[in-house]
Amino acid sequence: MCGIAGYTGYQEATSILLAALKKLEYRGYDSAGIAVLSAAPDFSGANIEVRKTKGPLSALEAALENNAPAGKLGIGHTRWATHGEPSDINSHPHTDVSGSIAVVHNGIIENYAHLKSFLRERGVVFRSETDTEVIAHLIDHYYQNDKHPRSDPLLRATLQAISKLEGSYALGVIARDFPDRLIAVRKDSPLIVGLGKNENFIASDAPALLAYTRDVYFLRDNEIAVLYNDHVDMYNNSGEKILRESQHIDWDVESAEKAGFAHFMLKEIHEQPKALRDTLNPRLGGGINTAANVQIHFDELDLPALSAQAKRIVITACGTAYHAGVVGKYAFEHFARLPVETDIASEYRYRDPLFDKNDLFIIISQSGETADTLAALRLAKEHGAKVIAITNAVGSTISREADTVLYTRAGPEIAVASTKAFTTQLMCLYLLALELGRLRGVLGPERYAEGIAGLQKIPENAAKILEHKEAVQRYAARQFNKKKVFFLGRLFDYAVSMESALKLKEISYTHSESFAAGELKHGPIALVDKDTLVVTFATQETLFSKITSNVREVLSRGAASLIVMQEPDGGSTTFLEAAKTIADEIWTIPRTAAPFTPLLTVIYMQLFAYYCSVSRGNDPDKPRNLAKSVTVE
Ligand code: M6R
């Protein structure tokens, strides 16, 4: 995820910015840059110098050797590519045409294409492929057109610019005409102001500040801070001054990197509402507040042509990404009525699979580097297939070799266990399934709008699941020593049971398996005894009685039983009452259309796996024998 640093004070900005960016390296990045404003002590002769490079901070440091800009005000950035590949030109900071305003940005500007056209019509020539560049030009546009130049024009121009932005953003802004100040803005992307003595700072995360100060303002959404050397003014987004109490941070550096969470995995589980929103909203056009006239768009794809041609979808991936593919299979069948074949990439590459020129081939990979997945991609391409990759890593090998890339917007995952990468892959697949359904004429306007509305509720409902984490933790404390944990489900619930079993085994080292619930009686039930926990997903109420009879079979063998299901519908508690007779623990999700339930039920299971792992004394971030990116066979 990108990192922001900013400084105004009496020291050389370059060295402070580099030191702060180093403390943000753990967030993951692919390029880095700084912009420093140099001026005489009376602020005359101001000039902004930008240095930026693709690659690690050491590459930037090498570029700065004997060429570091001098100045006491600056902004810096580590970039995790979202729009445009990692490159020098796409790295931040970005400036307006004349180089007099520089901006660093974390987040995603959803309407950047629209803003780009607006600015192009006014003669702006863009240099990068990023969404961020529009912000620098937009601030300049409003600055140049300001009719009230005496009332803090940089703040006014910034306020006008952000009023046009849709999406998430944390910003650092400096301007040649205002060499005494640094502007910081936050909406849906974290930003902290650090308060020093005759110097002030900004950073996207506390570790970057701790060497300089522990007194901070955690900016809230829609707040703007204007930092001078000797004070900081705070504003709301109407430009009215506000008062904020500073906070004192007493975390050590290690817990600051995890934003106060005990592990990266727990932090990443909690980032899911935002990651889901960031993956969903940029794909929705026509106003995102009312589902009725919203349309899904995949600008990277000629989906109408693909939809007219596709007779079958083939999905391959590994591990968690494969489980996303299994959910995708059910979703494409359900919403688009297309036959789907899903296979594990390590199997697919050695099969003798049938190819058809009308196949739509989808590869899923968080890292974009998994060796087996890459081999499956290459095999498909050798046979003339057009490959769509769903990945989280811009510039990865898979993203370079696929014909089209659909990026998830999860931000980098540091914990080995995939959590937010999985749910954002699902989000991408659902959007694709709904849009294909519409284009193929199998989803009428009503079901299409219902589908979109269902997805729009997911981020807030994901946040509601996280509110139950104490209950999950308590249950994990009772169950973590079970010898066997089996996960049961049918259809969409079966796909989640596969992912739940993988999550639990990889970080808690508990023997866990998933079964299609109907298969239990064909063999696995022989394994069930009093040392077994059976977790049953029962979110599809049309299948409720079938699944509860499977649970009864395991109860009579002495197993403990956890049921995950929909919360009661209005006043009707029939299903809940039935579940109470066969479960010693029940977790409910906010009511959600059956196909979308994996997005919520899996969050319970990520938390459960996490707490079991911790209860067993493991390090959930670095499970034994596993690597984050499996680049070998
Ligand atoms: O980077 P990828 O999505 O291609 O990785 C695939 C699997 O290695 C990965 O999902 C693995 O199963 C995770 N550690 C599961 O949490």
Image (tube, rainbow, N blue to C red):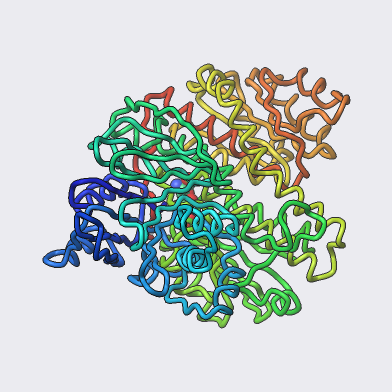
Identify the residue shown where x is 11% and y is 66%: 66
Image-quadrant location for residue 535: top right
240 vs 61: above or below: above
327 vs 246: above or below: below
Percent x, y of residue 472: 57, 24
478 relative position to 631: left or right: right
Q: How many marks?
A: 0
569 relative position to 129: left or right: right
Identify the residue shown where x is 46% and y is 74%: 401
336 relative position to 385: left or right: right
Q: Can the viewer see residue 349 in this picture?
A: no
281 vs 192: above or below: below
Nearer the observer, 502 or 532: 502
Identify the residue shown where x is 48% and y is 56%: 366
Q: Can the viewer see residue 403 in this picture?
A: yes
Identify the residue shown where x is 78% and y is 52%: 290
Percent x, y of residue 74: 29, 55
Percent x, y of residue 609: 51, 32
Q: In which quarter of the image is the C terminus?
A: bottom left
Nearer the observer, 220 or 444: 220
Image-quadrant location for residue 248: top left
Nearer the observer, 242 or 113: 242
**Which residue is the extreme one toward the left?**
66
Percent x, y of residue 15: 19, 52
